[in-house]
Amino acid sequence: MSGLTDSERSVITRSKYTRTPGESSLLAKSRYLSYLREHKHRVEGEIRLISDEIADEVGEGRNVDIGPYRVRVQAARAFVKIKDAGSVPLDFCSAQPDRKVILRHFQQTGEVVPGIDVSMGRPIVYVTSHAG
């Protein structure tokens, strides 16, 4: 709802969870929250799909000006998940396994430390408008 004034946003928000006759405010708000969560799930799927298509077309680590928009694609990053802390070599531990040290080791050597899963994140696509 960006680009709306506070009063426009208030009218839209209030109208979405207007009570039906005999319905409590809490029930109306609960119904609306349920609707928003379902809608959010659908929208997030669309965002992932379109973002992936843009990232494929633009390329990671690039900026493109297209019409009134600037599109920037941040490269995907690796991240680590500790599967079994007990099998992580002590070189990668202080009190417990250190994700930063493990990730740096993976990035430098490509070697996956025992007890660790390494996954690649997704490219992040930013779209901003040139118009103020």
Image (cartoon, rainbow, N blue to C red):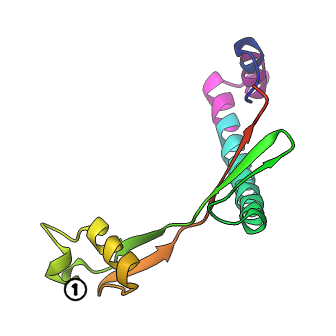
Outermost residue, top direction?
7
In percent of width and height, residue 83 lies at 33, 79
In percent of width and height, residue 66 lies at 83, 48
In the image, 39 versus 110, the foreground residue is 110
Outermost residue, right direction?
67
Residue, x 20% and y 76% (percent of image)?
92
* The stretch drawn in magenta includes residue 14: yes
Residue segment shown in magenta: 10-31
In percent of width and height, residue 51 lies at 72, 59
Residue at the spot of label 1: 87
Quadrant containing the N terminus is top right
Residue, x 36% and y 84% (percent of image)?
109
Residue, x 73% and y 27% (percent of image)?
17
Q: Is residue 18 above or below residue 128?
A: above
Quadrant location of residue 59?
Answer: bottom right
Residue, x 35% and y 72% (percent of image)?
103
Q: Is residue 120 above or below residue 131?
A: below
